[in-house]
DNA sequence: GCTTTTGATTGACTGAGTCAACTAAATTGA
DNA sequence: TCAATTTAGTTGACTCAGTCAATCAAAAGC
């Protein structure tokens, strides 16, 4: 559950931006086009060759309504439609020369409007605002998100992120108390304080600058590698990141000459358990505990390398 | 003249957010209210006692249209209108009990919608998005006033946040290596693991769900309170949060009967040093160290209570 | 080959939003 | 001071943006 204060802020912003966009969009009033018209023409101009279905989906428009708009645009010779050879029902929409100049006219108007607004701002403010806009879009627009997550070694702040995300996750999902976050912090802190790059490692899964997951291998002595703090953020579940992280651990441990990997987990973490099992780990012991409040089944798994 | 690339980005964002808001606002479809209705009711609910003119101006609505909406609301007994004694033409609008519960219903819906969207995001993304929203609003909305910062006890995730933000800050600003983050994690982890609510405390400065600063008091034994991990985020410097946090520590330590507060810091942290000095701390020892890479001057300060 | 699904269109409607004219109170100014 | 002007809000008359259901035709599924 997200912090209510965050949600309230988001709503405030939405109210503000609804007004703000309404103000901007008033500008279409002195053209024979509605905002919707402009959006449609813009979309066709920007993605030459779209079909009506995609347009309706992207702009959240009623197909019937869109159909009428397109018909009018065809009559006014702003666009041309030819049937898609691959699908005779569908049609490929392109702007005509006249349509393109109208499209560009919209562009100029919109540019001028924003430029006028930006010109009233202080030095650096436009840059800061646009930067923030890009941030929001990268987060909220699923299409703007770079598809690929990468796995990289840890750097400054990552260990803190691990503590924070695990602390939150176990508290929210399983009601574990703050002692758990404390344990994670201690484990992670010791890892950093005594970090031995020859035998230890931390992997962070990241997408577009946002951390999504983590795991670390610490030296348990006696040829045993300890796999710890495996975590995949809820936003990135199902992408196979957990498996990738565990695979990295196994490969690393083999390479470094460990003879066994050992890990401790809890039985309610089904996804994690499935990953361990599939990777060849076997359950060696199990004990009930109440270390962090609610009762849970702690499990130790090992993999012989 | 503003950079065209900035303007293009702003336009992209506006297009995206037009869609996004359109999507959110579809939700009003299964109520007998339109988006405009909801905005009007919201505005009256939020600013009890507005008059129609102000409403029309704020929401950019046609007075005629607004008049009809208000008439309907009066008929449905969602609002009440009584003439302004200072100006008999104007009328003061207030929500009735029924109106208020409808207003709250809108609030719940909007909250739930945003919460649902945020729940699909990665860890930290909602905070980042809201932070960016606030940035935009602060820049574009002349009448936006930043929410007040509050100071509260820690909860799940906060300790991780402390580790992360300090780890990042010292690495970026002073080139300290990861051993420092490790130390912070250990200190913070021990604090949680052995937390003694009677004699220890953690304060988090927060503004609208975003953490801005922290400090903690741990029991050093022998009647000495240890002030640790004082931090104020870049975005919140100059608001006096550092002083507030330290004041909390002093008041708490006095209340709990400590006879002295002791803290360790580094000489290059001028702002922090000024706060300690002003609060009455005195420098008792100083030593050169290279605990975290670059050479630095560690200092111990104490305050007798 | 039959049924179902999908892309697009048309008919029929409605109600959100607009524009102009109007009333009544407040303000202005010679 | 009182006629002229401005301001706050209302009403009449209208329109056109947007919706919903039905339909057609091509494609896909079984």
Image (cartoon, coloured by chain):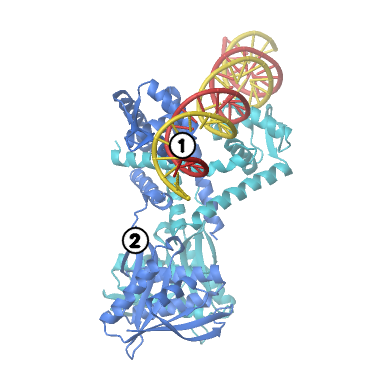
Chain colours: A blue, B cyan, C red, D yellow
Count of residue discs: 2
Q: Secondary structure at mark 1?
A: helix
Residue of label 2: A149
Query: Mark on residue A222?
Result: none
Badge 2 density bin: few <14, some 14–19, many ≥20, Cα 10 Å: some
Query: Where is B77 relative to A291, above or below?
Result: above
Q: Quadrant of residue B162?
A: bottom left
The answer to whether residue B42 is seen in the rendering is no
Relative to A209, C27 lies left or right: right
Q: Position of residue A53 (x, y in %)?
A: 42, 37
State the separation of the CA atoms marked 1 and 2: 33 Å
Badge 1 density bin: few <14, some 14–19, many ≥20, Cα 10 Å: some
Q: Position of residue B79 (x, y in %)?
A: 70, 37
Relative to A100, C4 lies left or right: right
Residue of label 1: A21
Q: Position of residue B49 (x, y in %)?
A: 66, 38
Q: Position of residue A63 (x, y in %)?
A: 48, 34
Q: What is the quadrant of the N terminus of chain B in the image?
A: top left
Please tell me which residue is depicted at 35% across the width and 81% down the height of the picture. Answer: A218
**Residue closer to the observer: B287 or B146:** B146
Q: Earlier in the sequence, mark 1 or mark 2?
A: 1
């Amino acid at each position: 559950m997200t912090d209510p204060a965050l949600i309230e802020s988001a709503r405030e912003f939405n109210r503000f931006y609804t007004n703000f966009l309404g103000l901007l969009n008033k500008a279409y009033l002195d053209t024979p086009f509605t905002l919707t018209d402009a959006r449609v023409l813009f979309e066709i101009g920007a993605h030459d060759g779209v079909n009506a279905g995609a347009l309706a989906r992207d702009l959240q428009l009623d197909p019937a309504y869109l159909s009428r708009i397109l018909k009018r645009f065809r009559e006014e010779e702003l666009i041309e439609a030819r049937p898609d050879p691959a699908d005779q029902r569908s049609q490929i929409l392109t702007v005509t020369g006249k349509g393109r100049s109208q499209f560009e006219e919209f562009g100029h108007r919109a540019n001028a409007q924003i430029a006028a607004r930006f010109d009233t701002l202080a030095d650096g403010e436009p840059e800061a605002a646009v930067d923030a806009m890009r941030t929001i879009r990268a987060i909220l627009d699923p299409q703007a998100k770079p598809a690929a997550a990468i796995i990289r070694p840890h750097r400054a702040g990552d260990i803190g992120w691990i503590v924070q995300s695990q602390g939150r996750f176990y508290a929210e999902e399983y009601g574990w108390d703050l002692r758990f976050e404390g344990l994670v912090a201690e484990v992670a802190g010791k890892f950093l304080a005594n970090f031995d790059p020859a035998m230890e490692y931390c992997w962070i899964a990241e997408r577009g600058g946002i951390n999504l997951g983590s795991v670390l291998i610490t030296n348990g002595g006696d040829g045993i590698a300890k796999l710890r703090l495996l975590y995949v953020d809820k936003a990135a579940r199902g992408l196979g990141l957990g498996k990738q992280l565990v695979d990295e651990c196994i490969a690393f441990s083999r390479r470094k000459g460990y003879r066994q990997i050992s890990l401790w987990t809890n039985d309610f973490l089904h996804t994690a358990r499935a990953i361990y099992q599939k990777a060849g780990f076997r359950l060696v012991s199990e004990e009930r505990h109440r270390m962090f409040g609610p009762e849970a089944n702690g499990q130790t798994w090992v993999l012989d390398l």
